[in-house]
């Protein structure tokens, strides 16, 4: 077909623009454009330059050709292959989003990032001629810069222009002169912006699998070889060697000329995972995450598309790596909520992984010591294939986990943030020159600031949340909109001076530890200390190098790390996540506590973990103490069935946001009435509307409606109906509506 006109969907993710626009194709672009090409086009009355995606071509149009606008250019380095276009359609339908949003998720880099060109210098004469020239010119002052450059070329006949200028201490003019005299030549090379230094890693080899690992590998490798589209739930206790299973399975994938995607739940785990994979597989390992520069992300995407990378590691966006032949997809720590996107399309990486694996006819591995209740339910009902690792990969001393009832500590007069047992354990561990991890899932110094006289709590001016006090700069900060004000000395309500910070955060723990253990070196790992591209790596490297005795952190320290000298883990407040407004609260508490206690005793020294709690008899705490997932599951699944939560029901949240609170409340009730009268709503249960857990953020009021259904199909039909309702409403006060199918968090 002649590519005279292109059918394009634009990159503006607005429901009203969810349609095809026709553009003319200039003759010069016709040989190269294809379905999936990403192009630059003029749009709207002002001809704003935007990005578009070609979904098809046609030869005729049904409107005046004089009104046709033309494609400006193609982004040659990027494009969406047919498989990924099909994936975008799946995401659009599955998560009830716009096609624009789905397509945009597939391209992690801006398409107009340029390749980084670097000039290199190559000697045009052989080594003997170089030596003769150096001997001839040496001692002549005028030629000293040229001699220095020749001496560099003697060692490195092919060197970057920047390097030779620095090493020889010469100007660009000296190099230009030598080019004119045909002593050397300049060439332009494309410099690959790699997110890691290959030379910084050593080479590792495969370890011999134990019986359990070998059994798991036999099944998984058989699926890879036979192109079986199975989903494996690899349920392995902490330290059971799940990563080694991943790597040996990937060995088979690479041997078959295919590629693998390895997803990790958060950026903090990237340095360790990249280190282990690069040491095993070398330069075929790629990395993709949001802390990379635009150039680095662009180069990683391009190298994957060209087939020069074979393994892509990263958080959920790594699932969109443009590999042509995928042999295995892995979700490590599959239970983590971060695999669910918070931005439209609100996809879950597990579902996208399973869809891509079906196209490539390859297996998926979901790995976790504490899998999601839904995943384990599917495994025992044989929708997934369950593989269990119940032994440590190495013969280590058993981990001793204890709970401390903080109510008894108070009764005995201990008002410290450390129980007597944890204090003694820290002291003993420091004396033995071993390391400690203290876990508290809240950053900052104190949770809130209040007047002790009248009880007034200082809240953010723009959000319905209390300020957190940060001691290092003596300021109050909102962790939702980042507004920051100086610490208040006088109560705004009653004028008293009895204003005090209450609660506990990682900064407060750090300050307290330094006070009572002044000789110990402590590091803090939370959002405030890990900003910047290498923030996580900097803290982790320092702790692994034993530059600190104690690592204090949020959930960043809870999983994946392998510090052999850590023999004590202290969970400061295990109940912190237990009573939040979320049906997953018990599950998240069990997962966090189990994961962080598993960081202790991963070397040849016995490990100990102490859990401080006010509810030691709660089944999630008891299960975490005993590292007993099945005990937790048996209790949790009964609660889910009784209350009608996943995996027995599908759920959808509808978050409606407006700057006008009165209008918002009226709108929510109108929407509920129209949902209740919808003809296909018989199989659904509508809960709410009610204020969201965070009822105001950045001056926007937030209300939520929850909907339960027996089938996912019923929810998607209702979601599309909701968009129609929203379009019919008066939008002068509305900011937007967010629909989330099977949310991983409460709003």
Image (cartoon, helix red, strand yellow):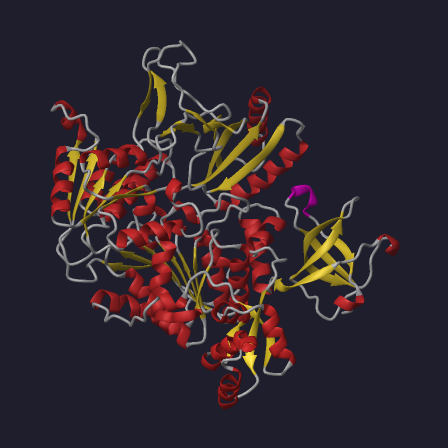
493 is within the stretch colored magenta: no
In the image, what residue occupies the spot 44% across and 70% down? 284
- Classify 11 as above or below 303: above
Q: Main secondary structure of the magenta part?
A: helix
Q: Hey, which quadrant is residue 89 in on the image?
A: bottom right
Left or right, residue 449 beside residue 86: left
Q: Hey, which quadrant is residue 124 in on the image?
A: bottom right
Residue 372 in view (yes/no): yes
Position of the C terminus, as image quadrant, is top left
Viewer-closest of 120 and 444: 120
Q: Position of residue 625 (x, y in %)?
A: 19, 43
Count the numbered circles shown: 0
Q: Position of residue 744 (x, y in %)?
A: 42, 42
Q: Position of residue 655 (x, y in %)?
A: 52, 33
Position of the N terminus, as image quadrant, is bottom right
Left or right, residue 659 beside residue 51: left
- Classify 244 as above or below 452: below
Viewer-closest of 312 and 497: 497
Residue 634 in view (yes/no): no
Q: Position of residue 528 (x, y in %)?
A: 39, 40
**Residue at the farthest bottom position:** 128
In the image, what residue occupies the spot 51% across and 54% down? 293
Span highlighted in magenta in the image: 14-18
Viewer-closest of 306 and 431: 431
16 is within the stretch colored magenta: yes
């Amino acid at each position: 077909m002649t590519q005279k006109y292109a059918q394009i969907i634009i990159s503006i993710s607005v429901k009203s623009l969810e349609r095809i626009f026709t553009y003319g194709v200039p003759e010069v672009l016709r040989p190269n454009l294809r379905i999936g090409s990403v192009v630059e086009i003029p749009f709207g009355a002002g001809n704003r330059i935007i990005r578009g995606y070609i979904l098809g071509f046609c030869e005729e149009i049904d409107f005046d050709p004089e009104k046709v606008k033309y494609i400006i250019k193609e982004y040659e380095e990027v494009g969406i292959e047919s498989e990924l276009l099909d994936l975008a359609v799946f995401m659009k339908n599955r998560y009830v989003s716009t096609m624009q949003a789905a397509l945009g998720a597939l391209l992690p880099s801006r398409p107009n990032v340029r390749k980084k060109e670097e000039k290199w210098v190559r000697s045009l004469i052989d080594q003997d001629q170089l030596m003769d020239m150096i001997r001839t010119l040496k001692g002549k002052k005028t030629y000293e810069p040229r001699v220095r450059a020749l001496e560099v070329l003697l060692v490195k006949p092919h060197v970057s222009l920047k390097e030779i200028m620095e090493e020889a201490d010469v100007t660009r003019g000296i190099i230009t002169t030598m080019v004119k005299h045909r002593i050397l030549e300049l060439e332009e090379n494309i410099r690959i912006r790699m997110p890691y230094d290959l030379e910084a890693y050593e080479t590792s080899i495969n370890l011999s699998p134990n019986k359990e690992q070998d059994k798991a590998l036999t099944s998984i490798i058989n699926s890879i070889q036979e192109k079986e589209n199975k989903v494996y739930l690899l349920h392995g206790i902490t330290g059971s060697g799940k990563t080694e299973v991943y790597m040996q399975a990937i060995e088979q994938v690479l041997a078959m000329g295919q590629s693998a995607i390895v997803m990790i739940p958060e950026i903090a785990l990237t340095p360790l995972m990249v280190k282990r994979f690069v040491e095993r597989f070398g330069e075929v390992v790629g990395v993709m995450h949001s802390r990379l520069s635009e150039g680095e992300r662009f180069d990683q995407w391009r190298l994957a598309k060209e087939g020069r990378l074979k393994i892509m590691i990263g958080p959920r966006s790594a699932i969109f790596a443009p590999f042509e032949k995928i042999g295995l997809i892995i979700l490590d720590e599959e239970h983590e909520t971060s695999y669910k996107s918070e931005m439209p399309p609100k996809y879950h990486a597990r579902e996208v992984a399973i869809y891509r694996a079906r196209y490539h006819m390859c297996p998926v591995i979901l790995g976790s010591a504490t899998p999601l209740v839904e995943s384990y339910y599917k495994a025992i009902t044989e929708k997934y294939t369950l593989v269990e690792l119940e032994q440590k990969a190495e013969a280590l001393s058993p981990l001793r986990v204890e709970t401390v009832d903080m109510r008894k500590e108070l009764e005995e007069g201990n008002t410290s943030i450390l129980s007597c047992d944890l204090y003694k354990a820290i002291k003993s561990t420091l004396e033995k020159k071993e390391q400690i991890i203290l876990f508290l899932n809240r950053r900052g110094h104190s949770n809130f600031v209040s007047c002790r006289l009248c009880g007034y709590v200082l809240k953010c001016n723009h959000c319905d949340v209390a300020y957190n006090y940060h001691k290092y700069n003596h300021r109050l900060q909102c962790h939702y909109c980042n507004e920051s004000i100086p610490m208040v000395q006088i109560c705004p309500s009653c004028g008293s001076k009895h204003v005090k910070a209450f609660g506990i955060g990682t900064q407060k723990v750090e300050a307290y530890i330094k006070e009572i253990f002044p000789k110990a070196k402590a590091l803090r790992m939370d959002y405030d200390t890990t900003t910047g591209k290498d923030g996580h790596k900097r803290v982790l490297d320092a702790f692994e190098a034993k530059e600190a005795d104690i690592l204090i952190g949020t959930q960043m320290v809870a999983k994946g790390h392998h510090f052999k000298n850590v023999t004590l883990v202290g969970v400061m407040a295990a109940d912190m996540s237990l009573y939040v407004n979320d049906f997953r609260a018990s599950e998240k508490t069990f997962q966090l506590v189990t994961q962080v206690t598993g960081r202790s005793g991963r070397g040849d020294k016995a490990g100990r973990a102490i859990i401080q709690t006010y509810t030691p008899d709660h089944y999630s705490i008891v299960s975490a103490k005993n590292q007993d997932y099945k005990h937790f599951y048996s209790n949790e699944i009964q609660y889910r069935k009784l209350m009608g939560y996943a995996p027995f029901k599908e759920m959808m949240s509808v978050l409606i946001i407006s700057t006008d609170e009165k209008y918002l409340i009226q709108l929510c009730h109108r929407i509920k009435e129209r949902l209740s009268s919808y003809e296909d709503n018989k199989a659904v249960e509508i809960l709410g509307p009610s204020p969201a857990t965070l009822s105001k953020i950045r001056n926007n009021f937030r209300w939520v409606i929850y909907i339960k259904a027996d089938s996912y199909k019923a929810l998607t039909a209702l979601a599309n109906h909701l968009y129609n309702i929203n379009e019919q409403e008066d939008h002068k006060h509305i900011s937007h509506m967010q629909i989330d199918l099977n949310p991983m968090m409460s709003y």
